Each structure stands twice: as structure tokens, then as C-alpha cells.
Image (cartoon, helix red, strand yellow):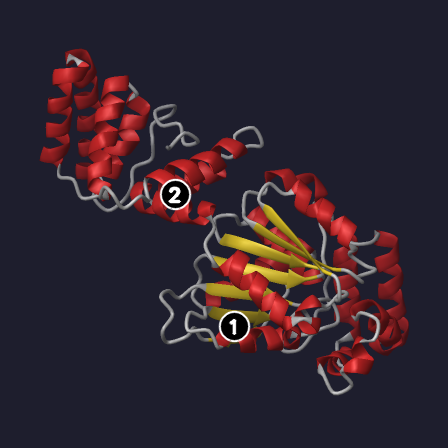
Amino acid sequence: MTVPTLRGFLTPASPTAATSRLLVLLPSLGTTSELWDGVVTRLAASPDAPRILRVDLPGHGASPVARDPFTVAELAVAVLDLVDEVGGGAFQVAGDSLGGTVALELAITAPERVVGFGMFCSGSRIGTAESWDERAAQVRASGTASVVAGSAQRWFAPGYLDAHPDGPGPRALSTLLDVDDESYSLCCEALGAFDRTAALDGVQVPALIVAGGHDPVCTASAMHELAASLPHARFVELPDASHLVPLEDPDATVALIADHLLTPSLYEQGMTVRRAVLGDAHVDRATAAITPETADFQDFITRYAWAEVWARPQLTRAQRSIATLASLVTGGHENELLMHVRAALRNGLTRTEIAEVIHHTALYAGLPAANAALAVMRDVFAEQASEPDTEPEPEPDAEPEENDG
């Protein structure tokens, strides 16, 4: 197995966009980045349009042909490599069919990078290994021309091609003829080996799950079950579409992406505040330590503590740090206090002000609590003095990463 090389097309953000967010769009097997043309045209017209990276599969469109086998996981690594080439960082990702499986794989294996993901006409498993092996053998023997008729039946709702004879549907079928036969076959085999069903309940990234009512491949009922298995998923069925929703109904696709991927969810808002207060290194450690048993609590504190309380405008973050320090000293919560002394420094409190908060709290919480708090404070200040440019690693058991509310 090997990581293939992928290429794509980058559409710049609107000049008036508030941020430089990145949206990655992945196509279905047998299609190219043109699948998303109608969506990109509409999104780019928005005054807050993000950067948009459309990626081609191996041997499709702009991507080089592949001759060595690869997995969906390796396609996901290749997407990350391409994202890093255009600036890196966190991003939203959406994909149709095979592209949707890659989006799911990214949400599972790179949750620190994926802010939200969308799966259009896709699944945690699509078909069977035997059926994909048969398709691969057919294309190796007779070329992609041999699957055009079947693709036309699967890809489009009844009557779509007749109603749009000069539209993107016929062009997509024509483009299928240009796809490299071996690369197509290797994509089939990657799909045949893909099954992420067992990992769904641990996915904490917000998800948009979209089904076409006429899709015979990834049926609406199967995708509804997929959404029900994901902790943070929104399911939508488009009754008049089939397997290529972004091509058949770009208007609905744009609306769904804008509402559910590009508009920050409460979880995303909370994660933004959490990172700003606690630092990326801390939050990355906490995210990496998530288990199925702690996942719900992590989601709870991110939404409730960081989005609904810490983000309220009535107090500044520095003022919230003062209140938090006083509360933690009073409760004797020394592990949490260690984290929030660091957070107070990030929020702009000086060492003198932090010490004064603890001094003042001693009047009401008692001297033993204040003494313990001052010891924690000294440890943090010593860390800051010895490693001024890095966030120190926590001592073993000194800072429970999963409880950072």
C-alpha cells in the first residue's frame, strides 16, 4: 500500500470574508472536481466565501494515475498532504460517495484538523468487497466505457438527464471515459476494503449526512442509520436526487453546506474559546485522550462551559479567570487550579493580580485552601520562567485533561 499523490483546484476566499477558512470538497468515484462546479460558483458569490479546495481522485482529472494499491485511509493522508501544501490548519470537508468515505476517515483519524464534515450519498461501508472486486475486474478488462450505462442509472434520478440534455450530467458521463482504468480499479478495491462502522460512535466532529431519495447505492434509509450512529450528525434527504447530489441539486447543497458546515456549531464555538483560553497544546492533549466513555462529557463541557458560559459577553475573559480562580481555590480543586492559573496568564492577568486573587480568596475560603493554591501558583510561575516559549507538559496525574471546564 502507498499514499497516492492528489491534485486539485483552489478557489480563493472572498476579499470581504472575515476569516480564511478552508472548505475541502471531494468527488465520487468516476467523477472529477467538476462535480462541485455548481456548488463552488454559488458559494464563491457569497461575501463571506471561504477558500475552497476541490480535490481529484487518483487518475481522475488533475491527479496523477496510480499503479500501486492504496486504502481510503491513505487517500485521507493524501488529502492532508494537499491541504498542507495550500497552507495547512483546520478545515471543513465534504465528499460524495468515495469522497464521503474519505471525509469520514479524516474525521476519525484527524479530529484536530477537521472542524466539520459532510457525507453526501456515502456510508461507513458501501457495497461489498466482492461487488467492488467485480467492478475493478470489469474496468481492467473493458475500460471505464463499460460502466458508463450503469453509472448513468445510479448517478441520476429518473428523468434528470432528459430534462438537462446540455447540463453537467452528460458531461460527467463523458468525463468518466477519460478516467484512468487502473486508477479507477484501485479506487474500487479501496472502497471494497473500507468499513468504519465500528468507529462511528467515537466520532466527535459535527457531521452533515445527505441522502438522495432515488439513490440505489447509498439509500436514504442506510444513510439515516449512519447519521443515527454518529454523536453529532444532522440527516437530510433530498427526495428528487440520486447519487450525485452536488451535481443534481447544487442550490440545496450550497444551502446545507452553508448552514451546517460553514456556520459554526455550538461545539465549534466552544472549541474556539477553549483553545483561546487553554492553548492548542492542552486541548490537543485532551482531544487525543478521549475515550468512548469520556466522549459525551468532552462534548458537554465544550458546548456548555466554553460556548454557553465562557463566551458570554457580560464579563471579559480576564474577569472570568478571576471568578474561576476564586471558585477553584474555595473548592480545593488544585488540579483544575493548575490549568486555570495558566489560563489566567493567557487571558491577560499579571502574576501580581493572580496572587492578589488568591490572597483575597483566603479571607473567605480559609488559609489552608489559599496556601495550597499559592503552591500551585508558584509551580506554574516557575514553569513559565524556565520555559517561556513553550507550554509545559503536565506532571503525571496533575492535570486531568478530560475535565477542563
Please indicate, yes or no, whether residue 63 appears anywhere in the rendered image: no
- The residue drawn where x is 41% and y is 45% is 271
- The residue drawn where x is 27% and y is 33% is 340
- Amino acid type, mark 2: Ala
- Secondary structure under badge 1? helix
Vertical comparison of 161 with 98: above or below: below
- Amino acid type, mark 1: Leu
Q: Which mark is residue 19?
A: none
- The residue drawn where x is 74% and y is 81% is 175
- Secondary structure under badge 2? helix
Left or right: 387 as drawn, with respect to 189: left
| Residue position marked by numbered label 2 in the rendering | 307
- The residue drawn where x is 74% and y is 87% is 166
Vertical comparison of 34 with 188: above or below: below
Image quadrant holding the N terminus, namely bottom right
Where, by quadrant of the figure, is residue 230 drawn? Answer: top right
Left or right: 43 as drawn, with respect to 275: right
Of the pair 210 and 91, the residue shown nearer to us: 210
Of the pair 118 and 159, the residue shown nearer to us: 159
Please indicate, yes or no, whether residue 72 appears anywhere in the rendered image: yes
Spatial distance from mark 1 to mark 2, Cα to Cα? 27 Å
Of the pair 206 and 345, the residue shown nearer to us: 206
Earlier residue among tags 1 and 2: 1
Residue 80 image offset from top left, x and y in percent: 53, 60
Residue 239 image offset from top left, x and y in percent: 75, 62
Vertical comparison of 320 with 186: above or below: above
Residue 115 image offset from top left, x and y in percent: 49, 53
Of the pair 363 and 337, the residue shown nearer to us: 363
Q: Which mark is residue 43?
A: 1
Where, by quadrant of the figure, is residue 29 drawn? Answer: bottom right
Badge 2 crowding class, 10 Å Cα cut-off, few under 14, some 14 to 19, many 20 or more, is many
